[in-house]
Image (cartoon, rainbow, N blue to C red):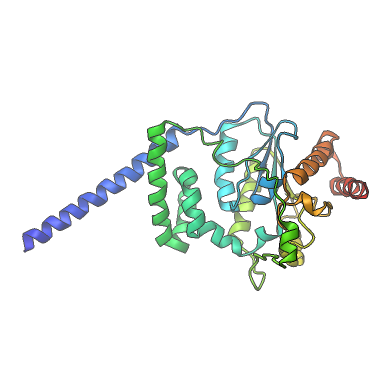
Amino acid sequence: MKGFIKKIIAFLALAIIALVAIVLSSNYIVKSKSTFNIDKDITNLFIGHSHSVCSVNDSIFKNSINLSASGEAYFYNYQKLKLVLDANKQIETLFIEFANNQVDSVMDDWTWGYEKMSYYLPFYSPFMESDDFNLLLDHNSTDLFASYSIATRKHLYRILSGDYDLVNDVGSFEPSMLSKVDELIAKKDFNPTLSKNLSLSKTNLSYLRKMIDLCKANNIKVFLIRSPQHPLYADLKNESVYKDVLKTQFNDVELFDFDAMEFPNSHYLDLHHLNYNGANEFSTLFNNLLENNLLNSPRKQRIIDSSIKAFNEN
């Protein structure tokens, strides 16, 4: 009996060693071979979650790329930003989406909830620093290890396929021709996503700060942007909290606020996002401002507000 137990223990020990070896070796291979290169004429970078995924048509902007990803918290934005900046020294300006829900504690689940970890760790786990790993470990160790299992499997698929060009996998402009707004309003389906007490996500905001500081350390201009949202967007109820966070925590960064832009319902995908038509009009207005030297103006938001007023009156 003792001999049998020893064999079981030895087998389990070997299995664990083999599993750890597979995880570490696949991580190492993906980390050492992956590339995040973009065209050398790209100098402007957009990063954020689904709001900028849907609103920023980078084909309209000059020398720009949109690497926003739906459902991606600032924790994962930060992992991406480090890799992209390291591989692309020509980047001069970063625009970070800063929407109402991104200050809220719902972003904690976007960071260490199973759904987000299992989706984003396959892209970023080989490149994460120990502090980042420990953050996830401290808040949700069970789902972290389950997510690493998924990540390892996808790493092995990547190794077998030889596809190490990750930049095309981690974000883009994703247009939609749909408009669900009239249907949602008729059903009174306003889909609020904020926490009941409008509490803040210290973690999400800390990683926004990390991105800002990273840009400043590399002499990269950084701005926050708020893409247009439907006036009935339920998460606007934390506007005072949102403005307070901006004032008290990020007063060293300028916000380009386009939330006052008015569109017909047909130009929104839903109450959160623009669709293709709205994105084209927003991107055209924003690009025209950049082409007219907005970034060097001392009164940037005043210029933006004036352009929005003219747009809304047409």
Residue 241 seen anywhere in this rendered image of the structure: no
Query: On screen, 92 above or below 259?
Result: above
Residue 19, how many percent across, how many down?
A: 29, 48
Task: Locate residue 55, reporting x and y percent.
Answer: 72, 46
Count all numbered tags in the image, as a single digit: 0
User: In what quadrant of the picture does the N terminus appear?
Assistant: bottom left
Q: Which residue is located at x 16 percent, y 53 percent?
A: 10
Tell me where residue 293 appears, x and y as whole percent.
Answer: 84, 35
Q: Position of residue 253 (x, y in %)?
A: 74, 50
Q: Residue at x 50, y 49 (%)?
A: 120
Query: Which one is nearer the viewer's eye here, 314 or 25?
Result: 314
Would you identify the image quadrant in which residue 303 lies? top right
Q: Is residue 42 visible?
A: yes
**At 71% from the left edge and 62% from the top edge, which residue is drawn?**
184
Q: Residue furthest top?
A: 40
Please say if 261 is above or below 67: below
71 w.r.t. 285: above or below: below
Question: Which residue, as the protein is rendered here, is positioned at the far bottom?
Answer: 197
Depth check: 150 or 25 in front?
150
Residue at image location 83% in from the left, 54% down from the top: 260
Q: Is residue 13 left or right of residue 169?
A: left
Q: Is 296 left or right of 313, judged from the image as shown?
A: left
Task: Please determine whether, in this image, residue 237 is positioned above or below residue 98.
Answer: below
